[in-house]
Amino acid sequence: MMITVTVPATSANMGPGFDSIGIALNLYNRFSMEECDCIDISATGGERIPNDETNLVYQCAKRVYDICGKPMPGLRLIEDCSIPQTRGLGSSSACTVAGLLGANALLGGPLHQENIIDLAAAIEGHPDNSTPAILGGFCTALLEYGKVWSVRVPIADKVDFVAFIPNFELSTEKARGALPKTIPHHDAVFNLSRAALLTGSLVTGDLHNLRVAVGDCLHQPYRFGLIPNGEEVVRSAKGLGALGAFLSGAGPTIITMVDKEDKTYYSRACMYFADRFPDWTPVLLACDEVGATVTQTE
Ligand code: HSE
């Protein structure tokens, strides 16, 4: 039996929603897997990926077999990846979710979606990546004592997302290391008020609030120092007419929200960036409403 799991990209830390608000985007990794008597891992595009027990998809699949008390025979895994790695677009979350869902399907579905959501967040550490990767859509999520508390919030269909993806990587670990241990009380209030305003405004479609609602002082100011031209890219992307811009996950990708009525933002951005920031590629995206899918072939 061959299982194929398709998982969307995700943008965590949306605006003020550090570690708590994320969205699934219509860029996908596809993983085909079946049991076999060895470990046989490859990538369709020939990318260099770990092809032994250290492969994240394999490790997550094994975790499910272990939890279910089943010996894992071996795994044939083919990865077909469109989500760029180490760019803040949830590629490792996609691998985690694929391993868990794929193994669960190979075992006949012993775990419920709720278990998978909890496990994915515990392994990944960022429920605002792993939860929308599974559920799709715009999600608020937190992890408490191993359990995810989350809600998939229906947002107005008024916004497109343009990701500005640089040609360099930034590891989450390094970006995490730039954060302070404590923050002033007024910074907490700054983010709290904007997180509520962002969520509410995306639900109602009150787009005029977004310029203020995407503000953040919990992580972005500390991380821009690790992202060459990051602040200039934010300024330019906003100057071209975006409703708001923020670091996707731990960066370095920057995402803008754009009014769907603004049909030429993307082409304006492509022209401007090709000239001024050729190391950054604009990619037009939309919210993925479906989340991870699992299909089975005999
Ligand atoms: N919330 C995580 C961080 C996102 O900012 O470190 C990782 O994608």
Image (tube, helix red, strand yellow):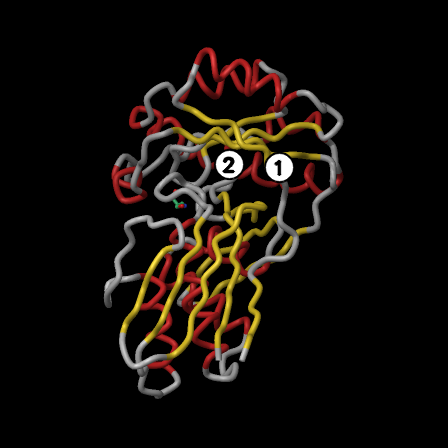
* Pointers 1 and 2 in contact (C-beta within 8 Å): yes
Q: Secondary structure at mark 2?
A: loop
Type of amino acid under label 1: Leu
Residue 5: percent from left, percent from top = 51, 64
Horizontal side of 295 relative to 33 (left or right) equals right
Question: For residue 71, what is the image quadrant?
Answer: bottom left
Residue situated in front as seen by the camera: 153 or 284: 284
Mark pair 1, 2: CA separation: 8 Å
What element does badge 1 sit on?
Answer: helix
* Labelled disc at residue 16: 2
Query: For the point 40% across and 54% down, which residue is it?
Result: 44
Residue at screen point 47% across, 51% down? 129
Q: Which residue is depicted at the point 39% across and 22% down?
A: 279
Q: Mark 2 is on which residue type? A: Pro
Say few, some or many: other residues with alpha carbon within 10 Å of mark 2 (under 14 / 14 to 19 / 20 or more): many
At 54% from the left edge and 80% from the top edge, which residue is drawn?
298
Q: Residue 81, how many percent across, how many down?
A: 43, 51
Looking at marks 1 and 2 on the same chain, the residue that comes earlier in the sequence is marked by 2
Residue bearing mark 1: 198
Q: Is the CB–ligand 1 distance for label 2 below 8 Å?
A: no
